[in-house]
Image (cartoon, helix red, strand yellow):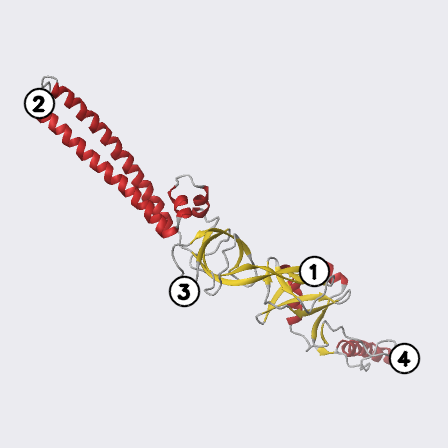
Amino acid sequence: MDLRPHTKRIILAILLPGLAAAIVWILATGKFDTGGKDKAGTPAAATQAVAIVNGVTVVMLDSATQIQSDIRTEPLLAANYQAETAAYGTVLDLQPLVDLHARYATALADADAAQAMAVAAQQEYQRSRVLYQDNQNVSLKTYQAAHAAYQSAQARSDIAALNTRNIQAAARLQFGATLARWALDAHSPELTRLLNRQEVLLRVALPLDDDMAAPAQIQISANQYRRQSAYLVSPSPQSDPVVQGSTFIYRAAVPTATGTNIAAYLPTPGQITRGILIPAAAIVWYGGQPWAYRQIDATHFGRYPVAQQSPMQGGFFVTQGFKPQQRVVVNGAQLLLSEELRPQAAPRPI
């Protein structure tokens, strides 16, 4: 009996599973070197997400990623810039105004009560006098006591009235006529807005060498670039202890803490410059400098510096580096910056 065919089958049954396992291991560990070429024999191209083009950092995002990330752009518009004078101010502490309001309300109530007592004492005194003069229907002692009570009540009424006038004078000296009127009016809507922190008061000092009148409306800023309007209330009867110059009280609807130093921008009449407004929504801050991502083509966005010398309502005014109708990213700019700064291969210059 010939056992050779049977022996061969046994050997193949043992070797074939091992050979298959070896092939799978080689393919899984990449031992076959294709030389970095695809099936067509050309080198495989890697997608470069960040590159430097003519000194500008450019981020590449395909259209699908832009839609998924809600990247939106808007065209830049030409704008006129009103030249401004910089000034400085401080958010005022409203506690003295609140205390004054409470003191005056108390003094007014005391004065009304004292006046009522004086009127009652006067009437009692007049009755006693009539009765005493009419055949002494009341004793001299009763008549004299009524007279003394009236004089005492009238003195207290006079003192209470004087106290209210003193508080009024103190309010005018400390805050000026307009704020004094707000503080002493029990139903003042302006004071209500201040007490509810819907508005704050600012003391703004104009530069010493500037003889310009205080504008009715100015722009203020207490952070990097956001600006809001403030409205003139009155001249300030007190100067700023830090900044010398003519001081004025403004009100603004900003939730700013007491004592915060603010920058104020006063319009200078007759000085207008033509340029571009970079909207605040397009600004990203990096390295202490504002930047904006300008769309270069359908999938590439370049990060360009924005001059910050001319902040204005809604953004920054620039005269170079950007042109009208160029599109800038107004939604998703921070995402582009994050993509740019994400660890990856060093950006390659082009």
Nearer the camera: disc 3 or disc 4: 3
Residue 95 visible to an observer of this rendering: no
Residue hosting label 2: 139
In the image: residue 179, left or right of residue 161:
right
- The CA span between labels 4 and 1 is 92 Å
Residue 336, percent from left and from top: 67, 66
- Secondary structure beneath dot 4 equals helix
Looking at the picture, which amino acid does disc 3 mark?
A: Val
Looking at the picture, which amino acid does disc 2 mark?
A: Ser
- The CA span between labels 4 and 2 is 156 Å
User: In the drawing, what numbered circle is on residue 242?
Assistant: 3
Looking at the picture, which amino acid does disc 4 mark?
A: Pro
Where 123 falls versus 100 (above or below)?
above
Question: In the rendered structure, which disc, 2 or 3, sits on the residue that comes first in sequence?
Answer: 2
| Picture quadrant where residue 165 is located | top left
User: In the drawing, what numbered circle is on residue 78?
Assistant: 1
> Within 10 angstroms of label 4, few (less than 14), some, or many (20 or more) residues?
few
